[in-house]
Image (tube, helix red, strand yellow):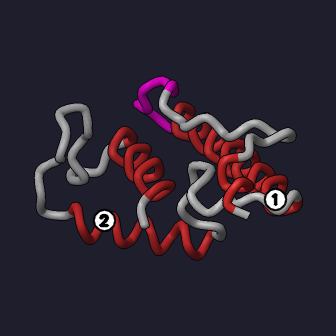
Amino acid sequence: MLGALDAPSAGLAEPAPLGEELPVAGPEELRALLRALAADYARDRAWRADREARGLWAGDGGGWASGSLAGFLESWEAWLGASLGKPPRFSDVPPVEPVTWASVAWQLGAARVYE
């Protein structure tokens, strides 16, 4: 059974993390990011289903911490709760407030992986 944990997938490739998107400065860029997130989520779910169908462990695989819209929204809320009133942890992270297109984009990406 432990060998299954290290077995490479013979099916779908593991989803690559998002990170090559153009900066979000307006509604069209945010729409493009939302399409990319939707596609990434679909790839992530397919990757997990493929691993599980073959009896392989998929617990820490993929890039999405949440398996549902409700879980994603809960992660977003938790991330906001941990971030409001604090300076960004990294220099390339926009502040949560004032709300900008870039800060909303960053929040969506953070909620994707926040547990």
Marker count (numbered): 2
- Mark 2 residue type: Leu
Secondary element at tag 1? helix
Q: Secondary structure at mark 2?
A: helix
Image quarter in which the N terminus is found: bottom right
Task: Tell me: residue 95, above or below residue 66.
Answer: above
Q: Position of residue 2 (x, y in %)?
A: 67, 60
The residue under the point 43% across, 67% down is 115
Res 111 → quadrant: bottom left
Dot 1 or dot 2: first in sequence order is 1
Residue 74, how many percent across, how many down?
47, 74
Question: 9 and 47: which one is in front?
Answer: 9
Q: Are marks 1 and 2 in contact (CB under 8 Å)?
A: no
Q: Residue at 78% of width from left, 42% of height from top?
A: 9
Of residue 79 and residue 65, the one placed in the foreground of this image is: 65
Q: Which residue is at 65% across, 70% downward?
A: 68
Per the image, the residue denoted by label 1 is 49
Q: CA distance from mark 1 to mark 2?
A: 30 Å
Check if residue 93 falls in the magenta segment.
Answer: no
Q: Which residue is mark 2?
A: 80
Task: Give the residue drawn at x 79%, y 55%.
Answer: 51
Magenta range is 20-27
Q: The disc labelled 1 sits on which kind of residue?
A: Ala
Q: Is residue 44 above or below residue 28?
A: below
Q: Which label lies toward us, 1 or 2?
A: 1
- Label 1 Cα neighbours within 10 Å, binned few <14 / some 14-19 / many ≥20: some
